[in-house]
Amino acid sequence: MKKLIHYINSKVLVKIASLQTTSVLTRIIAGILTSKAIALFIGAEGLALIGNLRNFVSAFQTIATFGFYKGVVKYVSDFKDDTIKLSKTLSTVYYTGFISTVVVSFFCYFRAEWINDVIFPTYNDYAYVVQIFAIVLPFYALNMFTFSIMNGFSKYKILIIINIIGQILSVSIALLLIYQNKIDGALISVVIAESLIFLITLVGIINRKSLVDQIKVSNVSYDIFKKMSPYSLMALFSAVLLPFVAIAIRSYIIDNLGYKDAGFWEAMTRISNYYLMFVSSLIVLYLLPRFSEINGIKAFKKEVLSFYKTIIPLMVGGLFLIYLLRHYIVLIIFSEEFEPVEDLFLWQLLGDFVKILSIIIAYQFLAKKMFWHYILTEAFLVIILYTTSVYFIDLLDNVEGAVIAHFISYLMYYGIILLIFGSSLFGLEGQKE
């Protein structure tokens, strides 16, 4: 525990902990306020539709930006003192992202009716919402491009300010739209929220005007694109497939159990996302950079076990407290209509516990760029998550089947992770990776 605290204080907290903590807190508060408004003005049925749209937006935003965010942060940070390499990095990312975003935007705009039929169940015509998304998507892409540059240049203070103002702006507009236009307003807020932050991010562009001159078509580099491809493909794989699996599961619940049950499952998923943000932030802040630094099996084993000893007791206590307070959590975030969600907590919390245990080890894939290990394990997770969800929903004829599937899927995923890293964690410490 002392080692973790010392590391965060000496290396992490000063640099990015403030940014991550502030971002997480504002995002959670904004999410709770939005969820409360949806519960009061729309209800469980509407929440199911909103969940499908959120997953679609998340997937296509990642496709539009080519999953470059982490790669840009890394290489801008590495090349910030090398004008030529920096120019090649910015030019390659900008023009690749520009082409990708334009293609995705045109596809979404002109195929809006087809997309509507895919992500929304029958009798729901929200094609115009998809077209709005297509129009504002380029602003999201520019926002992420600018964000990644500022992050690479360690402009943490301005990023904190942008995050706070952006979240306040987004939630304010979302609440207004939900109050005035109910389900339509909520759907519109989902597609425009992230793009609105670009208005605030313009401040960052103004402060870095000199960088604009370095973005040239002639500096687009295939070598830079090749270097960033592993980051891109790994980001695209999970960020695209997992949302579409969620859409498939939610649509299956709607078709077989009804809109309300799908809304209850979405509500449980939202609550889960809120408390998982804290754990995910800690893992990104501490574990990923630590895994990047260590080389030997002995050091890897020691780091994982040390993190387990520190985090697991806190996590067990936190999840147990959430379970005990589930009734009040549901009422605070949603409303009395959502009381059936309380029955979903046990399996969801168990699944999240195993999920965190597996992610702690699986971050080694990203730290060491173990591309195929990452792709194959994620593919396994996606397939097993959908098939077990369908099986248990049919078996129990209840939405509880979806959260049981969540637990079973991550338990199996954890088993695969332990098999892959078994020799590192339980083998001879004198071996090399």
Image (cartoon, grey):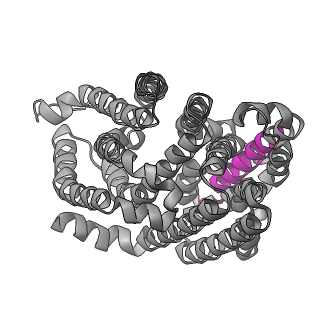
Tell me: 376 left or right of 160. Answer: left
Image: 143 above or below 398: below
Is residue 238 or residue 364 the one in the foreground? 238
Tell me: 130 left or right of 227. Answer: right
Q: Is residue 130 visible?
A: yes
How many marks do you count on the picture? 0
Residue sitting at 70 percent across and 36 percent down?
119
Residue sitting at 84 percent across and 41 percent down?
127
Residue 82 percent across, percent down from the top left: 60, 59
Residue 252 percent across, percent down from the top left: 58, 29
Image: 403 above or below 287: above
Is residue 25 or residue 7 the one in the foreground? 25
Tell me: 33 left or right of 24. Answer: right
Image: 141 above or below 388: below
Q: Main secondary structure of the magenta part?
A: helix
Residue sitting at 61 percent across and 34 percent down?
254
Q: Is residue 142 visible?
A: no
Query: Quadrant of the image for the C terminus?
Result: top left
> Which quadrant of the figure has residue 374?
top left
Region in magenta: 82-103
Query: Quadrant of the image for the N terminus?
Result: bottom left
Tell me: 328 left or right of 212. Answer: left
Residue 180 percent across, percent down from the top left: 79, 68
Q: Is residue 287 magenta?
A: no
Residue 175 percent across, percent down from the top left: 69, 69
Q: Is residue 100 magenta?
A: yes
> Which quadrant of the figure has residue 371?
top left
> Which quadrant of the figure has residue 225?
top right
